[in-house]
Amino acid sequence: MIAEITKGVKVSVETEYQPSYSSPSQYHYVFTYRITIENQSEFTIQLMRRHWYIHDAGFSQREVEGDGVVGQQPVLEPGQTHQYVSGCNLKSGIGKMVGTYDMERIVDGSTFRAKIPEFMMIAPLRLN
């Protein structure tokens, strides 16, 4: 697991290759990632937007952005966590993702970007 802390917001990531949903002969590799967002600050915060960069080795970079995460804009009191699972398809079987969450402090409406640490996605069969 890797993690990054920005202004009291800890973002941790775990990845897993999904062989039963992948088809390497058709250049289709599926990965899931579990994100844990922990509010270690003294303020109540809300996740408003996400912004991802997806690098697929040998292919063009993709950029994804939008409101919230998996249809939610979670509010986190100090000490609370929010966890979700999402996925990513790669053509090469080797890639990485990195990004940010736009966060808002409820008390005053100020915003900041929490970093999502860069993480690798490698299909085990690609390591041979």
Image: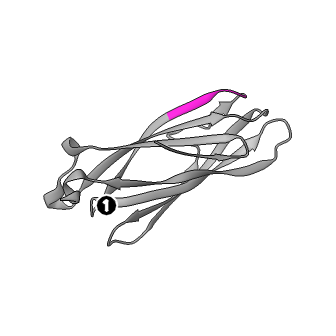
The span shown in magenta is 78-83
Q: Residue furthest left?
A: 25
Q: How is the image coloured?
A: one colour
In the rendering, at what x and y percent does residue 56 appear? 36, 65
* Residue tagged 1: 94
In the rendering, at what x and y percent does residue 11 appear? 58, 42
Q: Quadrant of the C terminus?
A: bottom left
Quick one: 70 or 23, which is closer to the camera?
Answer: 23
Please give the name of the residue rendered at 74% of the width and 51% of the height, measured from the top-left corner: 112
Q: Is residue 81 magenta?
A: yes
Please give the name of the residue rendered at 74% of the width and 35% of the height, measured from the top-left corner: 41
Is residue 7 rendered to the left or right of residue 28?
right
40 vs 87: above or below? above
Please give the name of the residue rendered at 72% of the width and 36% of the height, measured from the top-left corner: 45
Is residue 44 rendered to the left or right of residue 72?
right
- The kind of secondary structure element at disc 1 is strand
Please give the name of the residue rendered at 51% of the width and 57% of the height, measured from the top-left corner: 98
Q: Quadrant of residue 77?
A: top right
80 vs 14: above or below? above
Quick one: 3 or 21, which is closer to the camera?
Answer: 3
Can residue 101 be seen in this snapshot?
Answer: yes
Count of picture labels: 1
Amino acid marked by disc 1: Ile
Q: Residue furthest right?
A: 108
In the rendering, at what x and y percent does residue 30 appear? 29, 49
